[in-house]
Image (cartoon, rainbow, N blue to C red):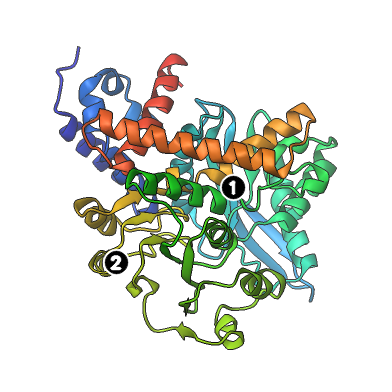
Amino acid sequence: MSPQIDPQDEIKTSIQSIKKLNGGQDEFLQAVTEVFGSLHSVIKEDPIYSRKKILERISEPERQIIFRVPWQDDQGDIHVNRGFRVEFNSALGPYKGGLRFHPTVNLSIIKFLGFEQIFKNALTGKPIGGGKGGADFNPKGRSDDEIMRFCQSFMTELYRHLGENRDIPAGDIGVGTREIGFLFGQYKRIANKYESGMITGKDPKWGGTLVRNEATGYGLAYFVREILSELNSDIEGKKFVVSGSGNVATYTIEKLNQLGGIVIACSDSDGFVHDKEGIDMDLLKQIKQVERGRIHEYADRKENVDYYDNKSIWTLECDVALPCATQNELQKEDAEALINNGVQVVAEGANMPASTEAIELFRESDVLFGPGKAANAGGVAVSALEMHQNASLNAMTFDETDKQLQQIMKNIHSTCRDTAKEYNTPKDYLNGANIAGFKKVANSMLALGLI
Protein backbone atom coordinates (compact mmCIF):
# COMPACT_ATOMS: atom_id res chain seq x y z
CA MET A 1 0.00 0.00 0.00
CA SER A 2 1.29 3.46 -0.87
CA PRO A 3 2.15 5.69 2.10
CA GLN A 4 -0.49 8.29 2.93
CA ILE A 5 0.42 11.81 1.83
CA ASP A 6 -0.92 15.15 2.90
CA PRO A 7 -4.16 16.00 0.99
CA GLN A 8 -2.90 19.50 0.26
CA ASP A 9 0.27 18.11 -1.29
CA GLU A 10 -1.71 15.55 -3.27
CA ILE A 11 -4.07 18.15 -4.68
CA LYS A 12 -1.15 20.41 -5.54
CA THR A 13 0.61 17.52 -7.30
CA SER A 14 -2.59 16.62 -9.19
CA ILE A 15 -3.06 20.20 -10.38
CA GLN A 16 0.56 20.38 -11.55
CA SER A 17 0.09 17.15 -13.50
CA ILE A 18 -3.13 18.43 -15.08
CA LYS A 19 -1.42 21.69 -16.05
CA LYS A 20 1.36 19.74 -17.73
CA LEU A 21 -1.15 17.72 -19.75
CA ASN A 22 -3.30 20.73 -20.66
CA GLY A 23 -0.86 23.55 -21.25
CA GLY A 24 -2.40 26.79 -22.49
CA GLN A 25 -5.95 25.79 -21.52
CA ASP A 26 -6.32 28.60 -19.00
CA GLU A 27 -10.10 28.50 -18.55
CA PHE A 28 -10.12 24.75 -18.00
CA LEU A 29 -7.24 24.91 -15.51
CA GLN A 30 -8.98 27.73 -13.63
CA ALA A 31 -12.11 25.59 -13.25
CA VAL A 32 -10.16 22.54 -12.08
CA THR A 33 -8.13 24.56 -9.57
CA GLU A 34 -11.29 26.11 -8.14
CA VAL A 35 -13.02 22.76 -7.57
CA PHE A 36 -9.94 20.96 -6.25
CA GLY A 37 -9.30 23.84 -3.84
CA SER A 38 -12.40 22.77 -1.89
CA LEU A 39 -11.46 19.11 -1.55
CA HIS A 40 -8.72 18.95 1.11
CA SER A 41 -11.08 17.79 3.88
CA VAL A 42 -12.78 15.30 1.57
CA ILE A 43 -9.49 13.67 0.52
CA LYS A 44 -8.32 13.56 4.14
CA GLU A 45 -11.63 12.10 5.33
CA ASP A 46 -11.63 9.21 2.85
CA PRO A 47 -8.28 8.11 1.34
CA ILE A 48 -10.06 5.90 -1.21
CA TYR A 49 -10.36 8.92 -3.51
CA SER A 50 -6.56 9.05 -3.56
CA ARG A 51 -6.02 5.31 -3.97
CA LYS A 52 -8.44 5.13 -6.86
CA LYS A 53 -6.99 8.25 -8.56
CA ILE A 54 -10.35 10.01 -8.66
CA LEU A 55 -8.84 13.49 -9.08
CA GLU A 56 -6.90 12.41 -12.14
CA ARG A 57 -9.84 10.51 -13.62
CA ILE A 58 -12.51 13.12 -12.98
CA SER A 59 -10.43 15.87 -14.64
CA GLU A 60 -9.79 13.87 -17.83
CA PRO A 61 -12.71 13.76 -20.31
CA GLU A 62 -13.98 10.36 -21.29
CA ARG A 63 -14.04 11.52 -24.90
CA GLN A 64 -13.05 14.67 -26.83
CA ILE A 65 -14.44 15.14 -30.33
CA ILE A 66 -13.04 17.87 -32.64
CA PHE A 67 -14.24 18.16 -36.21
CA ARG A 68 -14.35 20.35 -39.32
CA VAL A 69 -17.57 22.23 -40.13
CA PRO A 70 -17.61 23.44 -43.78
CA TRP A 71 -20.57 25.58 -44.89
CA GLN A 72 -21.59 28.00 -47.62
CA ASP A 73 -22.90 31.55 -47.12
CA ASP A 74 -25.62 33.32 -49.14
CA GLN A 75 -23.04 34.67 -51.59
CA GLY A 76 -21.74 31.20 -52.34
CA ASP A 77 -18.47 31.64 -50.41
CA ILE A 78 -17.24 28.63 -48.43
CA HIS A 79 -16.26 28.89 -44.77
CA VAL A 80 -14.66 26.37 -42.44
CA ASN A 81 -15.22 26.36 -38.69
CA ARG A 82 -14.17 23.99 -35.93
CA GLY A 83 -16.71 21.98 -33.97
CA PHE A 84 -16.30 20.44 -30.50
CA ARG A 85 -18.04 17.99 -28.21
CA VAL A 86 -16.38 17.03 -24.94
CA GLU A 87 -18.12 14.09 -23.29
CA PHE A 88 -16.66 14.57 -19.84
CA ASN A 89 -18.23 12.20 -17.35
CA SER A 90 -21.10 9.68 -17.55
CA ALA A 91 -20.95 8.21 -14.04
CA LEU A 92 -24.40 9.60 -13.16
CA GLY A 93 -26.06 9.21 -16.55
CA PRO A 94 -25.79 10.16 -20.23
CA TYR A 95 -23.73 13.23 -21.08
CA LYS A 96 -25.77 16.44 -20.77
CA GLY A 97 -24.70 19.96 -21.63
CA GLY A 98 -25.24 22.77 -24.11
CA LEU A 99 -23.76 23.82 -27.43
CA ARG A 100 -22.15 27.26 -27.72
CA PHE A 101 -21.73 29.07 -31.05
CA HIS A 102 -19.34 32.00 -30.54
CA PRO A 103 -16.07 33.11 -32.16
CA THR A 104 -14.19 32.73 -28.86
CA VAL A 105 -14.97 29.01 -28.56
CA ASN A 106 -11.93 26.76 -28.28
CA LEU A 107 -11.06 23.47 -26.60
CA SER A 108 -10.15 25.14 -23.29
CA ILE A 109 -13.51 26.88 -23.00
CA ILE A 110 -15.47 23.76 -23.94
CA LYS A 111 -13.51 21.71 -21.40
CA PHE A 112 -14.02 24.24 -18.60
CA LEU A 113 -17.74 24.33 -19.36
CA GLY A 114 -17.92 20.54 -19.50
CA PHE A 115 -16.02 20.14 -16.24
CA GLU A 116 -18.34 22.59 -14.47
CA GLN A 117 -21.32 20.79 -16.00
CA ILE A 118 -20.39 17.51 -14.26
CA PHE A 119 -20.94 19.00 -10.80
CA LYS A 120 -23.79 21.31 -11.78
CA ASN A 121 -25.74 18.34 -13.13
CA ALA A 122 -24.94 16.32 -10.00
CA LEU A 123 -26.37 19.08 -7.79
CA THR A 124 -29.72 19.00 -9.60
CA GLY A 125 -30.30 15.47 -8.31
CA LYS A 126 -31.12 14.28 -11.84
CA PRO A 127 -29.46 11.21 -13.42
CA ILE A 128 -27.34 13.09 -15.96
CA GLY A 129 -23.62 13.22 -16.62
CA GLY A 130 -21.59 16.19 -17.83
CA GLY A 131 -20.58 17.34 -21.31
CA LYS A 132 -20.36 20.44 -23.47
CA GLY A 133 -19.90 21.37 -27.11
CA GLY A 134 -20.00 24.10 -29.69
CA ALA A 135 -18.15 25.81 -32.51
CA ASP A 136 -16.15 28.97 -33.22
CA PHE A 137 -18.99 30.15 -35.48
CA ASN A 138 -20.45 33.64 -35.06
CA PRO A 139 -24.21 33.67 -35.77
CA LYS A 140 -24.42 37.47 -35.45
CA GLY A 141 -25.27 39.11 -38.75
CA ARG A 142 -25.96 35.79 -40.46
CA SER A 143 -29.23 35.04 -42.23
CA ASP A 144 -31.55 32.25 -41.16
CA ASP A 145 -30.51 30.27 -44.22
CA GLU A 146 -26.80 30.63 -43.38
CA ILE A 147 -27.41 29.53 -39.80
CA MET A 148 -29.45 26.58 -41.05
CA ARG A 149 -26.66 25.48 -43.39
CA PHE A 150 -24.09 25.77 -40.62
CA CYS A 151 -26.26 23.78 -38.18
CA GLN A 152 -26.84 21.07 -40.78
CA SER A 153 -23.11 20.73 -41.44
CA PHE A 154 -22.36 20.71 -37.71
CA MET A 155 -24.93 17.98 -37.00
CA THR A 156 -23.80 15.89 -39.99
CA GLU A 157 -20.70 14.99 -38.00
CA LEU A 158 -22.02 15.22 -34.44
CA TYR A 159 -25.15 13.09 -34.89
CA ARG A 160 -23.23 9.79 -34.69
CA HIS A 161 -22.20 10.61 -31.10
CA LEU A 162 -25.66 11.59 -29.81
CA GLY A 163 -28.73 9.81 -28.47
CA GLU A 164 -31.25 10.06 -25.63
CA ASN A 165 -29.31 7.43 -23.66
CA ARG A 166 -25.86 8.52 -24.82
CA ASP A 167 -25.39 12.29 -25.14
CA ILE A 168 -28.08 14.98 -25.05
CA PRO A 169 -27.00 18.50 -26.08
CA ALA A 170 -28.97 21.69 -25.54
CA GLY A 171 -28.58 25.41 -26.22
CA ASP A 172 -26.09 27.89 -24.83
CA ILE A 173 -24.70 31.22 -26.06
CA GLY A 174 -25.56 31.61 -29.76
CA VAL A 175 -27.82 28.54 -29.77
CA GLY A 176 -31.50 29.16 -29.15
CA THR A 177 -34.77 27.58 -30.24
CA ARG A 178 -34.09 28.42 -33.91
CA GLU A 179 -30.71 26.67 -33.92
CA ILE A 180 -32.03 23.71 -31.92
CA GLY A 181 -34.73 23.27 -34.57
CA PHE A 182 -32.21 23.22 -37.41
CA LEU A 183 -29.95 20.82 -35.51
CA PHE A 184 -32.79 18.43 -34.66
CA GLY A 185 -34.14 18.54 -38.20
CA GLN A 186 -30.78 17.40 -39.57
CA TYR A 187 -30.46 14.70 -36.90
CA LYS A 188 -33.92 13.36 -37.76
CA ARG A 189 -33.05 13.41 -41.44
CA ILE A 190 -29.77 11.46 -41.05
CA ALA A 191 -30.71 9.12 -38.22
CA ASN A 192 -34.10 8.34 -39.82
CA LYS A 193 -35.97 8.53 -36.52
CA TYR A 194 -37.92 11.10 -34.52
CA GLU A 195 -35.89 10.85 -31.34
CA SER A 196 -37.02 14.07 -29.65
CA GLY A 197 -35.23 13.13 -26.42
CA MET A 198 -31.79 13.43 -28.06
CA ILE A 199 -31.73 17.23 -27.66
CA THR A 200 -33.34 19.75 -25.31
CA GLY A 201 -34.26 23.39 -25.62
CA LYS A 202 -36.82 22.56 -28.31
CA ASP A 203 -39.86 24.65 -29.14
CA PRO A 204 -42.81 23.46 -26.98
CA LYS A 205 -44.80 23.01 -30.20
CA TRP A 206 -42.67 19.97 -31.08
CA GLY A 207 -41.40 18.40 -27.91
CA GLY A 208 -39.95 21.21 -25.83
CA THR A 209 -41.01 22.09 -22.32
CA LEU A 210 -42.46 25.33 -21.05
CA VAL A 211 -40.17 27.46 -18.83
CA ARG A 212 -37.02 26.24 -20.67
CA ASN A 213 -36.20 29.72 -22.06
CA GLU A 214 -36.76 31.25 -18.65
CA ALA A 215 -35.23 28.46 -16.58
CA THR A 216 -31.66 29.66 -15.95
CA GLY A 217 -32.75 33.21 -15.14
CA TYR A 218 -35.73 32.18 -13.04
CA GLY A 219 -33.62 29.58 -11.25
CA LEU A 220 -30.98 32.19 -10.43
CA ALA A 221 -33.64 34.44 -8.88
CA TYR A 222 -34.99 31.52 -6.83
CA PHE A 223 -31.49 30.63 -5.62
CA VAL A 224 -30.85 34.25 -4.59
CA ARG A 225 -34.16 34.23 -2.72
CA GLU A 226 -32.92 31.26 -0.70
CA ILE A 227 -29.56 32.93 0.04
CA LEU A 228 -31.30 36.11 1.21
CA SER A 229 -33.50 34.04 3.50
CA GLU A 230 -30.29 33.02 5.32
CA LEU A 231 -29.85 36.74 6.04
CA ASN A 232 -33.46 36.95 7.28
CA SER A 233 -34.27 39.03 4.22
CA ASP A 234 -35.96 38.68 0.84
CA ILE A 235 -35.89 40.07 -2.70
CA GLU A 236 -38.58 42.72 -2.29
CA GLY A 237 -37.13 46.24 -2.29
CA LYS A 238 -33.54 45.12 -2.88
CA LYS A 239 -31.43 46.82 -5.57
CA PHE A 240 -29.91 44.47 -8.16
CA VAL A 241 -27.27 44.89 -10.84
CA VAL A 242 -27.41 42.26 -13.60
CA SER A 243 -24.73 42.12 -16.28
CA GLY A 244 -25.69 40.98 -19.76
CA SER A 245 -28.98 41.32 -21.60
CA GLY A 246 -29.25 37.94 -23.27
CA ASN A 247 -31.52 35.07 -22.33
CA VAL A 248 -30.19 34.48 -18.79
CA ALA A 249 -30.04 38.15 -17.83
CA THR A 250 -33.43 38.98 -19.33
CA TYR A 251 -35.34 36.30 -17.46
CA THR A 252 -33.40 36.93 -14.26
CA ILE A 253 -34.58 40.53 -14.44
CA GLU A 254 -38.14 39.46 -15.25
CA LYS A 255 -38.41 37.15 -12.24
CA LEU A 256 -36.71 39.62 -9.87
CA ASN A 257 -39.24 42.25 -10.96
CA GLN A 258 -42.10 39.81 -10.29
CA LEU A 259 -40.70 39.14 -6.81
CA GLY A 260 -40.48 42.84 -5.97
CA GLY A 261 -36.80 43.47 -6.67
CA ILE A 262 -35.48 46.63 -8.38
CA VAL A 263 -32.99 45.89 -11.16
CA ILE A 264 -31.18 49.15 -11.83
CA ALA A 265 -28.73 48.10 -14.57
CA CYS A 266 -27.98 45.63 -17.35
CA SER A 267 -25.45 45.54 -20.16
CA ASP A 268 -24.14 44.15 -23.41
CA SER A 269 -20.62 43.99 -24.86
CA ASP A 270 -20.71 47.71 -25.74
CA GLY A 271 -21.71 49.18 -22.37
CA PHE A 272 -24.44 49.33 -19.72
CA VAL A 273 -27.59 51.27 -18.88
CA HIS A 274 -28.39 52.60 -15.41
CA ASP A 275 -32.13 52.99 -14.83
CA LYS A 276 -32.69 54.14 -11.26
CA GLU A 277 -36.45 53.46 -11.52
CA GLY A 278 -35.88 49.83 -12.49
CA ILE A 279 -35.44 48.13 -15.86
CA ASP A 280 -38.56 48.19 -18.07
CA MET A 281 -38.95 44.56 -19.18
CA ASP A 282 -41.23 45.28 -22.12
CA LEU A 283 -38.75 47.76 -23.58
CA LEU A 284 -35.75 45.51 -22.90
CA LYS A 285 -37.41 42.53 -24.60
CA GLN A 286 -38.47 44.64 -27.57
CA ILE A 287 -34.92 45.85 -28.17
CA LYS A 288 -32.99 42.68 -27.43
CA GLN A 289 -35.35 39.84 -28.40
CA VAL A 290 -37.53 41.31 -31.15
CA GLU A 291 -35.23 43.85 -32.81
CA ARG A 292 -31.92 42.18 -31.82
CA GLY A 293 -30.63 45.67 -31.05
CA ARG A 294 -27.98 47.08 -28.70
CA ILE A 295 -28.44 48.11 -25.08
CA HIS A 296 -27.71 51.80 -25.73
CA GLU A 297 -31.05 51.94 -27.57
CA TYR A 298 -32.75 51.44 -24.19
CA ALA A 299 -31.30 54.76 -23.00
CA ASP A 300 -32.27 56.39 -26.30
CA ARG A 301 -35.93 55.49 -25.80
CA LYS A 302 -36.46 56.03 -22.06
CA GLU A 303 -35.99 59.22 -20.09
CA ASN A 304 -33.74 59.51 -17.05
CA VAL A 305 -31.60 56.55 -18.07
CA ASP A 306 -27.80 56.83 -18.23
CA TYR A 307 -25.65 54.86 -20.68
CA TYR A 308 -21.96 54.17 -20.08
CA ASP A 309 -19.40 52.60 -22.38
CA ASN A 310 -16.29 53.57 -20.46
CA LYS A 311 -16.70 52.16 -16.95
CA SER A 312 -17.66 48.97 -15.17
CA ILE A 313 -21.26 48.10 -14.30
CA TRP A 314 -19.93 46.83 -10.96
CA THR A 315 -19.20 50.39 -9.77
CA LEU A 316 -22.92 50.92 -9.14
CA GLU A 317 -24.24 50.63 -5.59
CA CYS A 318 -26.48 47.61 -5.12
CA ASP A 319 -27.55 44.97 -2.61
CA VAL A 320 -27.11 42.03 -4.98
CA ALA A 321 -24.82 41.64 -8.02
CA LEU A 322 -25.55 38.98 -10.63
CA PRO A 323 -22.94 38.50 -13.39
CA CYS A 324 -24.84 36.90 -16.29
CA ALA A 325 -22.68 37.70 -19.33
CA THR A 326 -19.51 35.64 -19.79
CA GLN A 327 -16.51 34.07 -18.07
CA ASN A 328 -14.13 36.24 -16.02
CA GLU A 329 -16.14 39.42 -16.54
CA LEU A 330 -15.93 40.35 -12.85
CA GLN A 331 -12.33 40.99 -11.83
CA LYS A 332 -10.59 41.80 -8.53
CA GLU A 333 -11.10 45.57 -8.86
CA ASP A 334 -14.80 45.01 -9.56
CA ALA A 335 -15.12 42.88 -6.43
CA GLU A 336 -13.42 45.62 -4.40
CA ALA A 337 -15.88 48.21 -5.74
CA LEU A 338 -18.89 46.03 -4.93
CA ILE A 339 -17.66 45.29 -1.41
CA ASN A 340 -16.92 48.97 -0.74
CA ASN A 341 -20.45 49.81 -1.90
CA GLY A 342 -22.01 47.35 0.55
CA VAL A 343 -23.07 44.45 -1.69
CA GLN A 344 -24.57 41.58 0.33
CA VAL A 345 -24.83 38.77 -2.23
CA VAL A 346 -23.09 37.90 -5.50
CA ALA A 347 -24.39 34.95 -7.52
CA GLU A 348 -23.22 33.73 -10.91
CA GLY A 349 -25.76 33.55 -13.73
CA ALA A 350 -23.03 32.92 -16.30
CA ASN A 351 -20.43 30.15 -16.10
CA MET A 352 -17.33 31.24 -14.14
CA PRO A 353 -17.94 34.99 -14.59
CA ALA A 354 -16.00 35.90 -11.43
CA SER A 355 -12.22 35.58 -11.47
CA THR A 356 -10.37 33.58 -8.84
CA GLU A 357 -9.14 36.77 -7.16
CA ALA A 358 -12.65 38.25 -7.08
CA ILE A 359 -14.11 35.11 -5.51
CA GLU A 360 -11.47 35.12 -2.79
CA LEU A 361 -12.30 38.73 -1.90
CA PHE A 362 -16.00 37.87 -1.58
CA ARG A 363 -15.23 34.84 0.59
CA GLU A 364 -12.92 36.87 2.85
CA SER A 365 -15.59 39.52 3.34
CA ASP A 366 -19.16 39.15 4.58
CA VAL A 367 -20.50 38.79 1.02
CA LEU A 368 -22.37 35.54 0.33
CA PHE A 369 -21.18 34.10 -2.99
CA GLY A 370 -23.30 31.69 -5.08
CA PRO A 371 -21.16 29.81 -7.63
CA GLY A 372 -22.54 29.18 -11.10
CA LYS A 373 -22.60 25.39 -10.75
CA ALA A 374 -25.33 25.92 -8.13
CA ALA A 375 -26.88 29.30 -8.90
CA ASN A 376 -27.40 28.82 -12.64
CA ALA A 377 -28.34 25.13 -12.58
CA GLY A 378 -31.97 25.93 -13.37
CA GLY A 379 -31.39 25.64 -17.10
CA VAL A 380 -30.09 22.09 -17.06
CA ALA A 381 -32.64 21.15 -14.39
CA VAL A 382 -35.50 22.05 -16.72
CA SER A 383 -33.66 20.33 -19.57
CA ALA A 384 -33.83 17.18 -17.46
CA LEU A 385 -37.56 17.79 -17.00
CA GLU A 386 -37.85 18.09 -20.80
CA MET A 387 -36.11 14.71 -21.15
CA HIS A 388 -38.61 13.22 -18.71
CA GLN A 389 -41.48 14.79 -20.61
CA ASN A 390 -40.22 13.37 -23.92
CA ALA A 391 -39.78 9.89 -22.43
CA SER A 392 -43.22 9.85 -20.80
CA LEU A 393 -45.09 11.59 -23.67
CA ASN A 394 -46.74 13.68 -20.98
CA ALA A 395 -46.38 17.47 -21.29
CA MET A 396 -46.43 19.68 -18.18
CA THR A 397 -48.00 23.11 -17.83
CA PHE A 398 -45.91 26.23 -17.26
CA ASP A 399 -46.91 26.40 -13.60
CA GLU A 400 -46.16 22.70 -13.00
CA THR A 401 -42.69 23.06 -14.49
CA ASP A 402 -41.99 26.30 -12.65
CA LYS A 403 -43.05 24.73 -9.36
CA GLN A 404 -40.60 21.86 -9.91
CA LEU A 405 -37.85 24.34 -10.83
CA GLN A 406 -38.41 26.25 -7.59
CA GLN A 407 -38.14 23.04 -5.56
CA ILE A 408 -34.96 21.96 -7.38
CA MET A 409 -33.28 25.32 -6.70
CA LYS A 410 -34.39 25.16 -3.08
CA ASN A 411 -32.87 21.68 -2.80
CA ILE A 412 -29.61 22.79 -4.44
CA HIS A 413 -29.35 25.68 -1.98
CA SER A 414 -29.98 23.37 0.98
CA THR A 415 -27.40 20.88 -0.27
CA CYS A 416 -24.73 23.58 -0.65
CA ARG A 417 -25.56 25.21 2.70
CA ASP A 418 -25.65 21.95 4.66
CA THR A 419 -22.50 20.54 3.05
CA ALA A 420 -20.60 23.74 3.81
CA LYS A 421 -21.68 23.47 7.46
CA GLU A 422 -20.72 19.78 7.58
CA TYR A 423 -17.18 20.62 6.46
CA ASN A 424 -16.80 23.52 8.90
CA THR A 425 -17.08 26.31 6.34
CA PRO A 426 -20.55 27.72 7.10
CA LYS A 427 -22.05 30.08 4.50
CA ASP A 428 -19.33 29.13 2.00
CA TYR A 429 -21.56 28.10 -0.90
CA LEU A 430 -18.56 27.52 -3.16
CA ASN A 431 -17.15 24.85 -0.85
CA GLY A 432 -20.59 23.37 -0.34
CA ALA A 433 -21.30 23.10 -4.08
CA ASN A 434 -17.87 21.73 -4.98
CA ILE A 435 -17.80 19.12 -2.21
CA ALA A 436 -21.39 17.95 -2.69
CA GLY A 437 -21.04 17.69 -6.46
CA PHE A 438 -17.65 15.99 -6.27
CA LYS A 439 -18.71 13.37 -3.71
CA LYS A 440 -21.81 12.38 -5.66
CA VAL A 441 -19.88 11.89 -8.90
CA ALA A 442 -16.78 10.36 -7.28
CA ASN A 443 -18.80 7.82 -5.29
CA SER A 444 -20.64 6.80 -8.45
CA MET A 445 -17.32 6.35 -10.24
CA LEU A 446 -16.11 4.11 -7.43
CA ALA A 447 -19.28 2.05 -7.58
CA LEU A 448 -18.90 1.50 -11.33
CA GLY A 449 -15.34 0.22 -11.11
CA LEU A 450 -12.38 1.45 -13.13
CA ILE A 451 -14.08 3.66 -15.73
Question: Does residue 426 appear left or right of residue 223 in this picture?
Answer: left
Marks 1/2: CA distance? Answer: 31 Å
Frontmost of labels 1 and 2 is: 2
Q: Which residue is mark 1?
A: 98
Residue in the foreground of this view, choosing between 63 and 445? 445
Q: Secondary structure at mark 1?
A: strand
Q: Which mark is residue 448?
A: none
Residue in the foreground of this view, choosing between 61 and 252? 252
User: For residue 48, which quarter of the picture?
Assistant: top left
Q: Tally the numbered discs.
A: 2
The crowd level at tag 1 (other Cα within 10 Å; few <14, some 14-19, many 20+) is many
Query: Does residue 264 lie above or below 54 as drawn?
Result: below
| Residue 363 visible in the shown view | yes
Q: Residue at 55% x, 65% y: name it.
A: 103
User: Residue 229 in the image: x percent, y percent?
Assistant: 38, 45
Q: Residue at 67% x, 68% y: name it.
A: 289
Q: Which mark is residue 338?
A: 2
Q: Which quarter of the rendered picture does the N terminus lie within?
A: top left
For badge 1, the amino acid type reads Gly
Residue in the foreground of this view, choosing between 367 and 290? 367
User: Residue 172 in the image: x percent, y percent?
Assistant: 59, 54
Q: Residue at 65% x, 53% y: name it.
A: 213
Question: Does residue 148 appear left or right of residue 383 in this picture?
Answer: right
For badge 2, the amino acid type reads Leu
Q: Secondary structure at mark 2?
A: helix
| Residue 161 visible in the shown view | no
